[in-house]
Image (cartoon, helix red, strand yellow):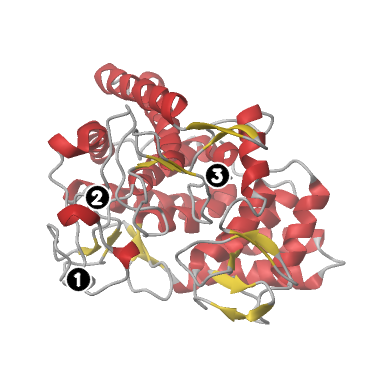
Amino acid sequence: MYQSVDRLIDRVKENFKDDVKIGDMFEKCFLNTINTTIKRLDDGTSYVLTGDIPAMWLRDSVCQVRPYLVIANEDKEVADMVEGLLERQFRYILADPYANAFNETANGCGHQADLTDMKSDVWERKYEIDSLCFPIQLSYLLYKNTGRTSQFNETFKNAVHTIIDLWKIEQNHEENSPYVFERLDCRQLDTLARSGKGPVHKETGMTWCGFRPSDDACTYSYLVPSNMFAVVVLDYVYEICTEIINDIELANKAKDLREEINEGIQKHAVYNHPRCGEMYAYEVDGLGNYNLMDDANLPSLLAMPYLGYTDLVDEKYINTRNFILSTENPEFHIGKYASGVGSPHTPEGYIWHISLAMQGLTTDDVEKKKELLEIMKNTDAGTYLMHEGFHPDDPNKFTRDWFSWANMMFCELVLDYCGIKVKK
């Protein structure tokens, strides 16, 4: 379908002549997303299935296509596919900025029985800050990797206004927000307390979040890595508005909110750990409570440099990373075949391929990257594909045999190891 794909696969395989399986896994994972999840529609937009669930997540779909940006500059079809995805994502956001996953058409599929303002084109309406961050990030990365600016159209501008307005509302969720969410007859992590309003909290300057990127409910209402991501994409909006589309009103709106959220992070989310020193908490509530952990899903604290919030040598990031990759993080697990970060979203003790890839993408140590690729290669359960979570003592026990996001995170780490990087 895309001429540049075969050339990139050949280039990667040339780098792994002595490790044929990694080259073959890259080929299978890279093609799996194109062949099984991406659908170009008659209106010029793109719809991207997450995999074994028949819906498109705003977050997943960005992560699924991100590695294709390395060929988007030489392949107009790839760039058009990404721009088509952005147009569809921003249309969805304008239809319901609180939703995280959407149907291809208004077919009423998904969680229509949830107690929230559901619409027939919404698959699920769990409000997650990152669902609004990722499309802004992708629009910016498409520009950085191709020079293309046609994605910054009226749909983009209207959606960004909507996103910023929503984030401002959610700075005072208790008083201003119309959003509630309850799911009946489910596990605790799939619904919000207090008749759908979520846990008690106090204003901090950060913006409130109902659910983590795992789609699990937040323990405390200010999800720190997602607020960090909001800071990053608001910087992108400022740059786009001042340098490309000349919208000073929107630029200043983004800049002001960025400063408020970042001040809230630095004031309320830094924790002085007795072993690690000053580090970031995963969640806080503004009332003095800190949730010290990290989750495998993106955005995560581990991913701070990858997202662009800080760099690898930042002291608080180093301290946070030391905590995350230790057993003091309740989601860090050690087994015979792997050690790494998992999530409460999957069975106890499972590790995620996404988090192993992110560990490799946030180090300059080439040998460590290779070591993590080896672990991923040896925990594929013989499928040549990645999974969601797997048991570190028995990789044949895993969740989700068709999970495109994980496949593409593996591909991004392979490309990174080969010196082929998405421009930021």
Q: Circle 2 sits in a helix, a strand or a loop, which is it?
A: loop
**Between marks 3 and 2 in the image, the one whose residue lies nearer the viewer:** 2
The disc, 1 or 2, on the residue closer to the chain's N-terminal end is: 1
Q: Residue at x 54, y 72 (%)?
A: 32
Which disc, if any, is residue 306? Answer: none
- Binning the other alpha carbons within 10 Å of mark 3 as few (below 14), some (14 to 19) or many (20 upward) gives some
Mark 3: secondary structure: loop
Horizontal placement of 230 versus 293: left or right? Answer: left
Give SS at disc 1: loop
Q: Is residue 82 above or below residue 404?
A: above
Residue under circle 3?
Answer: 73
Query: Measured from the top left, where is residue 10 in percent x and y?
Result: 72, 63
* Front-most of residues 25 and 403: 403
Residue 119 position within the rendered picture, expressed as x and y whole percent measured from the top left = 13, 61
The image quadrant of residue 259 is: top left
Percent x, y of residue 376: 69, 66
Give the Cα distance between marks 1 and 2.
15 Å
Q: Are marks 3 and 2 in contact (CB under 8 Å)?
A: no
CA separation, marks 3 and 2? 44 Å
Q: Residue 184 bears which disc, if any?
A: 1
Which residue is rendered at x = 51% and y = 47% of the image?
Answer: 300
Q: Counting other residues with Cα less than 10 Å from the Cα at mark 1, is it few (<14), some (14-19), or many (20 or more)?
A: few
**248 with respect to 107 (left or right):** right
Are the two marked residues, 3 and 1, in contact with CB atoms closer than 8 angstroms?
no
Amino acid type, residue under disc 1 in the picture: Leu
Circle count: 3
Give the amino acid type for the residue marked by disc 3 in the picture. Answer: Asn
How many other residues sit within 10 Å of disc 2, few (<14), some (14-19) or many (≥20)? many
Q: Which mark is residue 198?
A: 2
